[in-house]
Amino acid sequence: MRLIKPDTSIDFVAYAKYALVFSALLIVVSIVSFSMEKLTFGIDFTGGVIVEVGYPEAVELQNVRDALAEGEFPDATVQHFGASDSVMIRLAPEEGADSSDVSTRVMNALDVEDSAAELRRVEFVGPQVGDELVNKGGLALLYTVIAILIYVIVRFHWKLAAGAVAALVHDITITLGVFSLFHLDFDLTVLAALLAVLGYSLNDTIVVFDRIRENFRRMRKATPVEVVNASVNQTLARTLMTSGTTILTLLALFFLGGEVIHGFATALLIGIVIGTFSSIFVASVLALKLEVTSQDLFPPREEDAEKASRVTR
C-alpha cells in the first residue's frame, strides 16, 4: 500500500498564493508578538538559583512540584539529576533574596512533604551569564543561516539559495512567534531545538531542490512551473513519511517526556510542521518568483557558446 500514488499531480504552485498569504499572516502575528510580549526567557538566560536536593529513595517529581507550589514556588523547574533519588530545582531570581535565603525556603517547603530531604548543593546563576548565552545563541542561529546560504549557492544557484534561506527564516520566525504569543519558556533546550529545526527544514528543501535540478535536465520542454510541480509531487510521499514518523516520536516526547523536555518537543513539533510547509510552498515558489531556469542550474559550456555563435554567423 502506497501513501501517495505514483501518478499524483497536485498543482502546488496554483495554491502557493494562498499559502503565502497564510505565511505572511503568521509572520505578522509573530513580529507583533515580539514587539509587545517578547520572549519569556528561562533561568538559563535570566539567571536564578539552582538547588540540588537528595532523598533516601526514589521520589516522584510531581510530589516535589506540589510541595514547592504550596511553599510559594509555583514556577519552579524540577527534574531528576543523575538518579531518581536526586532532584534539581531551578528557581527564577528574586529581588533582595540571596541564594542561602532561597535554599532555606525551598527546604522548608520540602520538609512538609518529606523530612528526609537533604540539601546537597546551591548555585546562583548570574544575569550576566544569561546575557552572554542570549548573544551567543543569536550568533549561532545567524552563523548557521549564513553557512547554509553559502552551501546552497555553491551546490545549486543563488536563486535556490534565496528560497532556502527565506524558508529557514520563515520557520524560525513563526516558531519563536508561537513561544512569544503563548508565553512559553525559552531556554537552552528550545535553542537546541531551533538549530535542529534549521537542519531538518534544510534537508527537506534540499531533497526538493535535488529533484528540481534533475527534472530540469529530464523535462527539457517543460516550463519551470511544471518542473517545480512535478518535483514536489515526486518527493511528497518521502516528505510526508519522514515528517509523519518524526512527529509521532515528538508527540510521545511531548506527552510522556516530562516537564524538562516539554519545551524542546514543542519547538520541534512546531518547527517540523512549519518546515514541511515551507519546503513545499516557500522555498520552491520563491525560486520561481526569481525566474529560475535550467540555464541557471546547467550553464552552457564555453565551447558550446562559441559553436552557437558560429552557427548564427
Image: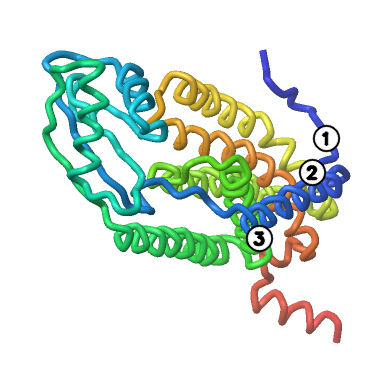
**Residue 164 at what x, y percent from top left?**
62, 56
Q: Residue furthest front?
A: 96
Q: Is residue 206 visible?
A: no
Count of all numbered marks drawn on residues in the image = 3
- Residue type marked 2: Asn
Q: Which amino acid is tagged 1?
A: Ile
Q: Position of residue 39 (x, y in %)?
A: 53, 51
Q: From the viewer's side, name the closer residue of 153 and 268.
A: 268
Residue at 64% of width from left, 56% of height from top? 36
Q: On the rendered structure, is 84 left or right of 158?
A: left
Residue of label 1: 10
CA separation, marks 2 and 1?
Answer: 7 Å
Q: Secondary structure at mark 2?
A: helix
The reply to whether the C-beta atoms of the residues labelled 3 and 1 are less than 8 Å apart is no
Number of residues whose C-alpha sits closer than 10 Å to that of mark 1, classed few (under 14), some (14–19) or many (20 or more):
few
Q: Is residue 304 visible?
A: yes
- Colouring convention used in this rendered image of the protein: rainbow
Give residue 233's position: percent from left, percent from top: 74, 36
Which mark identifies residue 229?
2
Residue extending furthest bottom? 313
Rendering quarter of residue 109: top left
Q: CA distance from mark 3 to mark 1?
A: 22 Å
Q: Residues within 10 Å of mark 3 (few under 14, many from 20)?
A: many
x and y, in percent, of residue 270 in the image: 59, 37
Q: Quadrant of the C terminus?
A: bottom right
Residue assigned mark 3: 160
Looking at the rendered structure, the secondary structure element under dot 1 is loop
The residue at the point 86 percent across, 49 percent down is 17
- The answer to whether 45 appears left or right of 294 in the picture is left
Label 2: how many Cα within 10 Å (few below 14, some 14–19, many 20+): many
Q: Is residue 184 above or below residue 173?
A: above
Question: What distance separates the C-alpha of mark 3 from that of mark 2?
Answer: 15 Å
